Image: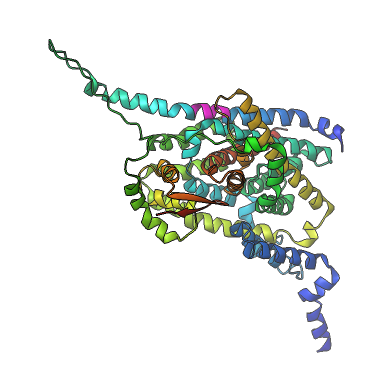
Amino acid sequence: MFDLLISFLTNTGYYFIAQDFRYFVMILVGCVFLYLGIAKKYEPLLLVPIAFGIVVGNIPFFKGFGIGIYEDNSVFHYLYFGVTSGIYPSIVFLGLGAMTDFSSLLAQPKLMLLGAAAQMGVFFTLLGALFLGFVPKEAASIAIIGGADGPTSIFLTAKLAPHLIGPIAIAAYSYMALIPVIQPPIMRLLTTRKERLIKMEDLREVSRTEKLLFPILGVLLCCLLAPTALPLLGMLFLGNLLKESGVVDRLANTARNAIIDTATIFLGFCVGMSTQADVFLTPRSLMIFGLGALAFSLATASGLIFAKIMNLFLRHKINPLLGAAGVSAVPGSAREVHLMGQHEDPSNYLLMHAMACNSSGVIGSAIAAGVLWSFNMIG
Amino acid sequence: MGLDNIVLNNGWSQAFVGASIVMTGLVILSIAISQIHKLVEFWENRSQKPATEPKSPSLGTATTVDHVTLEVPLQCPADINQTAALYQPLVDQMGTPFELKELYQRAVLFDLPHPHITLKCLREAGILSPQGDGMFRWNQ
């Protein structure tokens, strides 16, 4: 009887945690994320499922029971298939398309260039990751963190370096949640007060026909150029067409509510669970976090600098803060740009312009992911 | 590791070509969407051409051509208070202070006409006053 009790105790999570403290560290990380998500309201829709996933995924267990996310035929393994196959990110893009109003972008198409410029951070980081010794597929997966788009990062990593999904997804979502901490110092550093005070010209009203044509043109122009972006952009523009067509409101409503919520829950939870301490807490993960921060900062800086360069040629100057919204963290970076503009001048209203840059950033990062994927498949 | 690894894996080319493709893609898309409204306008004018053709002028009378204007109003409504009354119930639901973004979203939801321009006019009229940090107060 005593042997049975001992045998049971050596199979409990407490015993395994005592054997390997890394699980305890990860559970603490999960609790910190829960605090940030619930108490501080940092991207709670993402952080809460991810954080709880981290806690659940790091409860150690006896291997072989078919419990863990990395064990064949476990329930969590099947749910995780949606991540590794890229299904959840595509579904999230469908909902995102059904939520996004591209009017501000259609009213000022030149702001789309800022979304493209911010993607330069992705390619600078690609060089950085290669410099640090990562193989090309891993480097590409790390670099896409600079796109500041969680689903895109997960999609590309699932295709190129599935063993890095945990750290890359956590880095991508952490930096998205930390936008209010990361972006403002870079914005202040790279712009003068005079530039921050620039007021944008009013946006023109956009007709329904324009909004209707945009998803069709968008999918044709972007995906003919980079067909590998189809799983993301195809779904994004489908969602937007459902919204703008005005004849399938039921489908659009389902896409922007039930479908994206379901995908977000499973995506966040599974990504959190994939951070099992024994596969997550490695020196490479730390390097990925470092490179992720670099990618995010470089993307922000690229957008800001490009906006200043554009101003050299434009008659009506644009507020260079908008460049920081070129990363595709919707709507966090747009909100941050708006708040900084208002901090300098409460009557300066930049939100709608920043949303234009944000939405072009979503398209830009999906193209960048498609391009990196195709490079690595060709190579 | 190091620059050798970048060269060995064709990193410089990947970065340069990749960045160029992304930039090209979005430049093409931005050029295309900057032309959409012109094409739409052209198409709609084309379909209305028979209706706007001038009738043959009769002697001694001035010829007038009726232009069908499809442009949205770029000026504020004459009676801003009347417009404000439309927005009052939305503001009442939100409490004070409120986020302008939320008011805009509600205006779109309730199909109020030209919400972006209207909000701008309400701000200029002092009915919407900024409180900083993206928050606004309704002054009426």
Give above or below for A93 relative to A31. above
Nearest the viewer among A10 and A295 is A295
Nearest the viewer among A322 and A125 is A322
Q: Residue B103 colored magenta?
A: no
| Magenta region | B27-32
List x then y, in percent, for residue A90: 56, 47
The colour scheme of the drawn protein is rainbow
Residue A119 visible in this rendered orientation of the protein: no
- The image quadrant where one finds the C terminus of chain B is bottom left
- Residue at far top of view: B59
Residue positioned 60% across, 54% down in the render: A82
Nearest the viewer among B114 and A134 is B114
Residue positioned 61% across, 44% down in the render: A344
List x then y, in percent, for residue A161: 72, 46
Give above or below for B135 relative to B125. below
Q: Residue B29 colored magenta?
A: yes
- Residue at far bottom of view: A1
- The image quadrant where one finds the N terminus of chain B is top right
Give above or below for B53 relative to B15. above
Q: Quadrant of residue A325?
A: top right
Residue A134 in the figure: left or right of residue A365? right
Q: Quadrant of residue A278?
A: bottom right
Magenta span main SS: helix
List x then y, in percent, for residue A299: 69, 39
Total numbered circles: 0
Residue A16 visible in this rendered orientation of the protein: yes
